[in-house]
Image: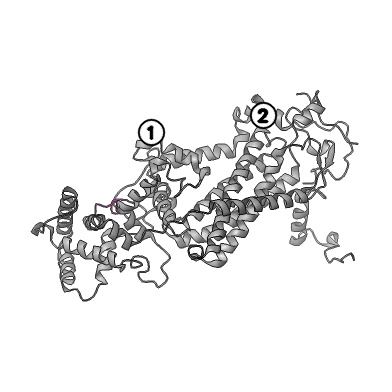
Amino acid sequence: MSDVATTTERRRPTLHRPVPPTPDAHDFATRPYDLVKEFVLALLAVSLLTTGLAAVFSSPDEPAITMSSWAKAAPADVVATAAAELAGTSASATYGPPYNSNAEGQKLLGIPTQKLGGVRIPVDSAALVLQPLGQVSRDLPLRAALARWGAASSAQQKAWATRYADALAKSGGKVAPAAGYGPVPLLADRFLNLARSGGLEGSLTSSGNFYGGDQTRSLLLLSDGAYLEDTARAQQLGGDQWGMMNETGNYPGQPWMWLYTFWYQVPPFATSENADAQVWGLMLLLTAGLMFLPLIPGLRSIPRWIPVHRLVWRRWYRSRPAASGPTPRA
Amino acid sequence: MTALRTTTVGAADHPSTNWTTWLRGRISGLVPPGEALPDRQPAYVVSWIYVFGVLTLAALVVVLVSGAVLAAGGVAWWHVSGLGHFVNSMHLWSVELFFAFMVIHLWGKFWMAAWRGKRVLTWVIGVLAFVASIGTAFTGYLSQSNFDAQWISAEAKDGLNAVAIGAWFNVLNPGQMLLWHVLLLPVAVGIVTVWHIVLVRRHGVVPPLDSERGE
């Protein structure tokens, strides 16, 4: 540490001192420079600019989708989602780690990276529907339906729910009662009523805890439906619409994530089943490349080949056309 | 101003195993005397590009102050208060400016090959600050408790889960994300920023390319 030179003291030139590849900054002539004044003026300028931008452009704040607003805007979607959760065919039910073991998840170069973390946040998709319904009181048909569902084998449950989900998909949401659906139509109907009434808000969040700070289950339920994505896509926020870096309204969003988002727009990532793992792997590699760029031959020489630095230091180069080295100040 | 007396003088009397002496030596040796806040710079430090490092730091201060005001009001304050919404807007735009300045600063340093002369670690820590800042901003978007937070978390979970990070860093848990946003990541950004600045002051501003003898 003691070999670091200073600009506040004049350094005596030493004979036979080894010449470093890059001269010591402290060997150059100096000029007055007020760092504190520069910072204070910068802080003032940025504060004023920020205030102006905030006053003129404000910031987006589209209210969160509630279970109630979902049920009122897209009731068929709520019913279809409930059926899919019960059938075990929803996105969360077939997700794999960290929510369940129902899929292996994504791989990177053959390595099952998604499995590496294990099932650390267990989520039972059927319980996303059954648990809130189990808390409803004074509804005897619902009690009977829940009892019938609970008494059936898992194969029977899956058969009922799958048949009903398929019928919903074919009919576009209206299905005539049929014996093959078991108690699923009534469960789905009551689930819709519960959501519409607002009774579903918080029931998946605060289960067992007054302070419900974890929205994992309610967000998974919402994501399993089509309404959330439809709403996002209508605002150009889909994954293939550069959605990860955008936000609602005409706001810049997170432009610093453009490269991460870019890969999702182009093949092979745009059509890959392992796109997330591949994009993450690529971005980790590129970030490491940026971080250790000074050690990578070729890349570190680009600034010498494309002389933008001539613009940065044009005054210094003009004053020192020979550019043969620093001027000893002593 | 009256000179203040000290109790730290006399370090030479301490045995070499004194931890305090060792730590003081390390701290005082980080930056050469007078270099923490020098009133002169090398003659080649004449360009607008040098301003963007300071602008980044200034924007970070505005980000922290506006974020602190938002934190004082609570999670939902900015949804129901005009003042809160304005402070949120300041927080948003200061973050946008912060990244704009930082990226210009980064590009400037790239074209100056600013890693020369034992400054590789300065570059590495600068990139680390950039990455930590992206994480901090990202968790901010997840902590908005509005539609954007819902959608971004629903989208982002797949990427994080695909590489097993989501098992510990759960973007669907706004309570966890808020704490990362207001404490853990800002502390990380603060540490790497101070580290970066100490390294800059320690080595000084990189000299011009082609100023090497013999080139």
- Residue A268: which disc? 1
Residue sitting at the far bottom: A138
Q: Nearer the viewer, residue A91 or A197?
A: A197
The chain holding disc 1 is A
Q: Given the image, on which type of amino acid does mark 2 rest?
A: Val
Magenta stretch, residue numbers: A88-96
Q: Position of residue A149 (x, y in %)?
A: 17, 64
The answer to whether B8 is drawn above or below residue B59 in the figure is below
Residue B121 appears left or right of A290? right
Residue A52 appears left or right of A285? right
**Magenta stretch: residue A93 in it?**
yes
Could you say which quadrant of the image residue A14 lies in? Answer: top right
Could you say which quadrant of the image residue A266 lies in? Answer: top left
Is residue A121 visible to us here?
no
Front label number (1 vs 2):
2
Instruction: Please name the residue shown 39% across and 47% down the image.
Output: A235
Q: Position of residue A194 (x, y in %)?
A: 26, 67
Q: Position of residue A329 (x, y in %)?
A: 88, 36
Instruction: Please name the residue shown 44% across and 37% down the image.
Output: A263
Label 1: few (<14), some (14–19) or many (≥20) C-alpha neighbours in 10 Å: few
Q: Secondary structure at mark 1?
A: loop
Q: Which residue is mark 2?
A: A308
Q: Position of residue B47 (x, y in %)?
A: 73, 37
- Residue A66: which disc? none
Q: Given the image, on which type of amino acid does mark 1 rest?
A: Pro
Q: Nearer the viewer, residue A59 or A194?
A: A59
